[in-house]
Image: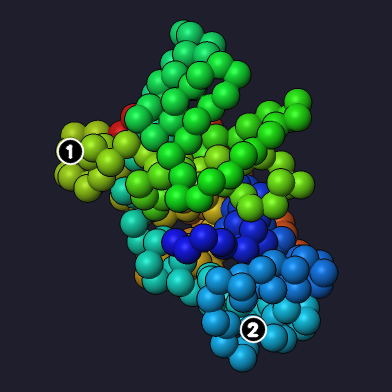
Amino acid sequence: MGPYFPDFLTPAAARHSLEAGLEEIRSTPRHRLRSELQRLARHVSLPSWVRPLADGEVSALTRLTDALRAYHQAAIASHDDLIQPAVAADRAKHVARFLDNGVEGLLASMSPTMRWRSPILEVDYDIDQDLHLGGQGLLLVPSFFCRRVPISLADPRLPPVLVYPINPTWELYAKEDPGRRALETLIGGTRAAVLRAVGTGVTTTQLSHRLDISLASASRHATVLREAGLLTTVRHGPTVVHSRTALGASLLERCS
């Protein structure tokens, strides 16, 4: 990554689902688009198609989010069964340290890329930057794709966020094991596949494409899992997005 990455491309709403994050990108105010893309242009040469985006043209924003959705589908979605357990394991490790040792113990455990020297958290970073919390909390986000050093948002007016790389020694490749077979025995092979494929949020159509099943089948299995408390379904405009509940995530983690 270069010295700057536009903050509007990492929307806070993405924590809820991919579609919610894409909707926030589509709703980015024109002044923010122009400001952040102008800042990006100081570091790299931008292609001509960026101008309509900087002008906030709806069609340009729609093309951008369609491309992001297609990329997610092609490069990331099919690996959710590897990504989600790795991130969940890292999160569980740090939550346990927080419960056992409080905030001080949690921050002290974030080495070697971070060093807690109260009241300052020193972070290995590619550029020299100070982030003053000013009484705000700091959101720590584990990332499967972040490499070498943590990263933060560039705009200090945005809520403080620090994205950090998960431990690269985690076992990232799914293997056939008794736990996976147990899940399929418990809820059925297709429903187990649906629970794994949902990831951080998918529409029924995306679920159908990921698993190569009909829309009716995807909807039916999602309904059964929702009624069992393993999925939740939220409407975002014309689309319906399915996400795992805490119970669904816990079941998947235990059987992975």
Q: Quadrant of residue 5?
A: bottom right
Which of 24 and 186 lies nearest the eye of the viewer?
A: 24
The residue singled out by tag 1 in the image is 177
The reply to whether residue 12 is in sight is: yes
Q: Secondary structure at mark 2?
A: helix
**Label 1 packing within 10 angstroms: few (<14), some (14-19), many (20+):** few
Question: Can you tell which mark lies on residue 50?
Answer: 2
Which of 225 and 209 lies nearest the eye of the viewer?
A: 209
Q: Secondary structure at mark 1?
A: loop
Q: Amino acid at mark 1?
A: Asp
First along the sequence among labels 2 and 1: 2
Which of 93 and 42 lies nearest the eye of the viewer?
A: 42
Vertical relation: 180 (above or below) 100? below
The residue furthest bottom is 48
Q: Position of residue 109 (x, y in %)?
A: 40, 21
Q: Nearer the viewer, mark 2 or mark 1?
A: 2
Q: Position of residue 35 (x, y in %)?
A: 75, 68
Q: Distance from label 2 to label 1 (Cα)?
A: 47 Å
Q: Position of residue 216 (x, y in %)?
A: 52, 66
Please give the name of the residue rendered at 44% of the width and 25% of the height, measured from the top-left corner: 115
Please give the name of the residue rendered at 69% of the width and 52% of the height, measured from the top-left corner: 155
Please give the name of the residue rendered at 50% of the width and 50% of the height, measured from the top-left corner: 127
Question: Can you tell which mark lies on residue 239?
Answer: none
| The C terminus: image quadrant | top left
The reply to whether residue 87 is in sight is: no
The residue furthest top is 100
